[in-house]
Image (cartoon, rainbow, N blue to C red):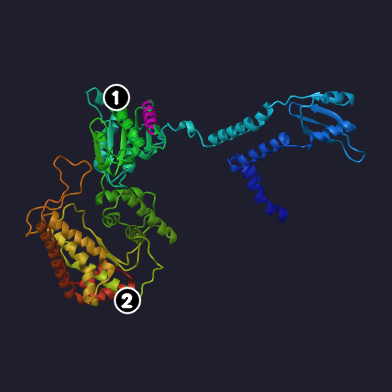
Amino acid sequence: MPSEDNKSQAPLRDRLRSWFGQKSPQKRKAGLPPKTHFSIWYFLAAMVLIMYLQQYFFSSKVETISYSRFKQDVATGLVSRLTIGPESISGTLKGKESTPDLQFTTVRVDDPGLVKELDERKIDYSGHYDSKLLGSILTWVLPLGLMFLIWRFAMKRMGPGQGVMSFGKSKAKLFAESETRVTFADVAGIDEAEEELLEVVEFLKTPDKFQKLGGRIPKGVLLVGPPGTGKTLLAKAVAGEARVPFFSISGSEFVEMFVGVGASRVRDLFSQAAGQAPCIIFVDELDALGKARGMNVFGNDEREQTLNQLLVEMDGFESNKGVIIMAATNRPEILDPALLRPGRFDRQVLVDRPDINGREAILKIHSRNVLLGPDIDLRKIASLTPGFVGSDLANLVNEAALLAARKNKETVGSPEFDEAIDRVIGGLEKKNRVMNSQEKEIVAFHESGHAIVAESVEHADRVHKISIIPRGIAALGYTQQQPTEDRYLLTRPELLDRLAVLLGGRVAEELVFGDVSTGAQNDLQRATDIARSMVAEYGMSERLGLVTYESPRQPMFPPEGYSPNKTYSETKATQIDEEISNVMELAHQRVRNILSERRPVLNDLARLLSEKEIVQGQELREMLAGPRT
């Protein structure tokens, strides 16, 4: 058995071994390969060695005496041997019986009679020439050599292609045909984008089919869409379907602090791609590289040079080489126009948010390896997640699986998916946030007002759940509605109904407490935006007529004749403000009438919410027990 002292010293020995690149006994027994670590201790050890050598060769190990004492010792016969150099004299002084001989040195003085005196005293002497070569080697060459060896070792530890001389090399990751295993079977919810890219796949598989008819495949394909919609996944699927190499790089990886590095990397990337043709080059986050030139006076000249090189490479890239460049961005409006012209990124493919059918298909893909319970209806989950993109849905499935595992369940059921949806939409549940009874009552009536108005108007989405559990940063409660279908156009009655639902919480507080709180701030902001859009953008005001008064946000490259200035008078601006106030006031009175008629239900629902904290939509409809008005 090892002693306690050995056990306490073991960690120190392991640290020393790791500093100097040695394996620990445990790793040697396990047969693991040695792992060398580059540490600052290597450098410190080298410096200590150099200092020791300098101390050994150049520091004084003998006694320095004056020349006058030296002459006296010569006269008294104490000097036995001498070495005379150009600048110094060194030798040995005879010791007494109890003391050893003493080595000495003294500065040489111009003394013509010294040699004659030494001959008379019969003292053995010799000449010596001090060579500075060894001193130079030990002082300069040896430290520089050690530093060079340390630098070489550090460069090797960085791995191939990571040294100083490799700055101009492309950092693109190459995925071979066998490594790109993503296909269109792994992509769902973006059918139109898939159809656009099937032509690219067919060209990469059978280029002769197009070339013999004189057809030219687009040199570049730009994938445009919100974040998380699957642009990168779609590019990998194209390479996987076509079974061709896939170069992947981010736009930010081209630009460095050194001038010319980005342009060199662009050239190197296209050179590598030409050697791997047919293949695909995929540039993610193109806007980091392809921002419009000249828009920022203090911009990065290196970035613009890199963009210029990319434009040159794309323009000079012959289509029959079989290399297609794909890029993705969620900010196409800031790209340089030269990138978007025909001959470069010929085709722009919109990768939009999926509809309910697309969300259901995406959920099926991400739940393939998840044990789902018998009560799971992916169609219903898709209807509860309007606006979710592919990454949101993947996160939703993963959150539900983690919740089920935390509860030690065998399968993932509906409660876990409901909780996961709440997490994704509202944030984590704030279990430690304790509200006093008054605040809890205000939140209960506020959310009850939203829910009752949503169930009372004709065009609002039906209520799925009401909760007064705090979530996220500032949400003290929420009312979750379940859309029956995806909508792309809204009519005036539908907008007015949405406006009424937003005001439901504020009006409920007025009716019950005779006062209002700060909890309706976000509701009022969204309601005001709807009212302003109805009046100033959509021409839904009878008083102002069929005119739009709000210009869209100024584009990056405004067309000829575009004027960002306000196109209406101050009088008209006053009328717009009055009409917005009128729309809000009419909605306010409408909501007040609805909640006044259903005040008993409002009280009962708020009381139930205070007790249970969560009320399902079906429970609310049973409480209302009447036709929608």
Could you say which quadrant of the image residue 572 lies in? bottom left
User: Looking at numbered disc 1 in the image, what kind of residue is underneath it?
Assistant: Asn
Q: Earlier in the sequence, mark 1 or mark 2?
A: 1
Mark 1 vs mark 2, foreground winner is 2
- Expressed as whole percent of the image width and height from the top left, the position of residue 167 reads 44, 33
Could you say which quadrant of the image residue 266 lies in? top left
> Any magenta on residue 271?
yes
- Expressed as whole percent of the image width and height from the top left, the position of residue 357 reads 25, 50
Foreground: 440 or 164? Answer: 164
- Expressed as whole percent of the image width and height from the top left, the position of residue 284 reads 34, 40
Q: Name the residue carrying label 2.
A: 438
Q: Residues within 10 Å of mark 1 (few under 14, many from 20)?
A: some
The stretch in magenta equals 262-274
Q: Is residue 472 left or right of residue 162?
A: left
> What secondary structure prevails in the magenta region?
helix
User: Looking at numbered disc 2 in the image, what kind of residue is underneath it?
Assistant: Gln
Secondary structure of the residue carrying numbered label 2: helix
Residue under the point 24% across and 50% down: 355
Residue under the point 29% across and 52% down: 388
- Does residue 470 show up? yes
Q: Is residue 184 above or below residue 407?
A: above
Secondary structure of the residue carrying numbered label 1: helix
Which mark is on residue 320? 1
Which mark is on residue 62? none
Q: Is residue 55 left or right of residue 519?
A: right
